[in-house]
Image (spheres, grey):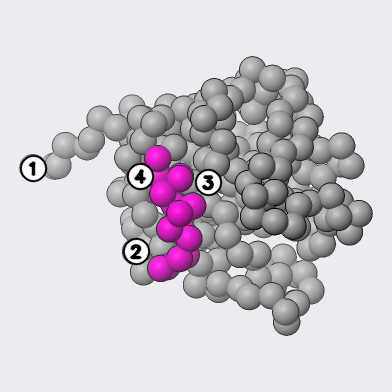
Amino acid sequence: MQARRPDKPRIGITKPAGKDWLVHLALSLSVRIAGGIPVKVTADQPRAPGEIDGLLLSGGLDLNPHLYEGEHDPARKYDDARDALEMAWARQAWDMDMPILAICRGCQLLNVSRGGDLLQAIDPEVLETYPTSPIGYALFRKDIDVNDNSRLATITGSNRLRVNSLHRQAVNQPGEDLHVTACESHGGVQAIESDAAHFVLGVQFHPELLIHRRDMRAIFGAFVSACRPS
């Protein structure tokens, strides 16, 4: 007899094996608040398509540049096992029309999985505006402009958001069937979306660290709702 599926959607949350537990806890809490069940997805626990209803690609280390014909930086660390896992999952989820929410590194990986590339180093003048202390990082915010007719604007109810984006790389050329729907003042990409009917949203900021705000909770709410088994 086939096992009964849970009423709440199961959200596969990617993370590096044995690391980034605080970020994972924040994402898991955000998913639970939205009505989903978080399921850890790592190179050690890769999961199968039938085990999850939606894919959440989380933040972390830079992608290995060989994935998009970028320049290797010997000073940076890469997690090739995680890259391989998430690239496979991003492509599989896309082919299955599985809802995808991609955050920070996840947004960049989603783009690369569709044949897009990354800006490996953003403008040094922009980096100079970033804080240097832990408290400064926690409190940093900047405004981004969101396209009026985008999924992100519909979800948040606004075409201007104040976010906590402190990235040093960014989406450059959007991948196949993806388009840019939010940017910051100097033009840096802050969100990408799919032309497909199913939920696909990548954001460069971290809504899980702003979960006290209604607009950020709405992002997780819309994603989890899209993942509910029919």
- Residue 125 horizontal/vertical position (percent): 91, 54
Q: Where, by quadrant of the figure, is residue 28 drawn?
A: top left
In the rendered structure, does residue 9 fall within the stretch colored magenta? no
* Residue annotated with mark 2: 45
- Residue 57 horizontal/vertical position (percent): 52, 50
* Residue annotated with mark 3: 94
Q: In the image shown, does 57 or 166 lie closer to the viewer?
A: 166
Disc nearer the start of the sequence (4/1) = 1
Whole-number angstrom distance, CA of label 4 to CA of label 1: 25 Å
Residue 96, relative to residue 67: is it above or below? above
Residue 64, relative to residue 225: is it above or below? below
Please say if the residues under marks 1 and 2 sit with CB atoms less than 8 Å apart.
no
Tell me the amino acid under the disc marked 2: Gln
- Give the foreground label among 3 and 4: 4
- Give the foreground label among 4 and 2: 4
Q: Which residue is drawn at 34% across and 64% down?
A: 45
Check disc 2: other Cα within 10 Å, few if <14, some if 14-19, many if 20+: few
Query: Which contiguous range is marked in magenta?
Result: 11-29
Residue 163, relative to residue 134: is it above or below? above
- Residue 74 horizontal/vertical position (percent): 73, 82
Whole-number angstrom distance, CA of label 3 to CA of label 4: 20 Å
For the image, the number of numbered tags is 4
Q: Where, by quadrant of the figure, is residue 72 drawn?
A: bottom right
Disc nearer the start of the sequence (1/3) = 1
Regarding residue 198, the answer to whether it shows in the image is no
Position of 187 with respect to 11 (left or right) is right
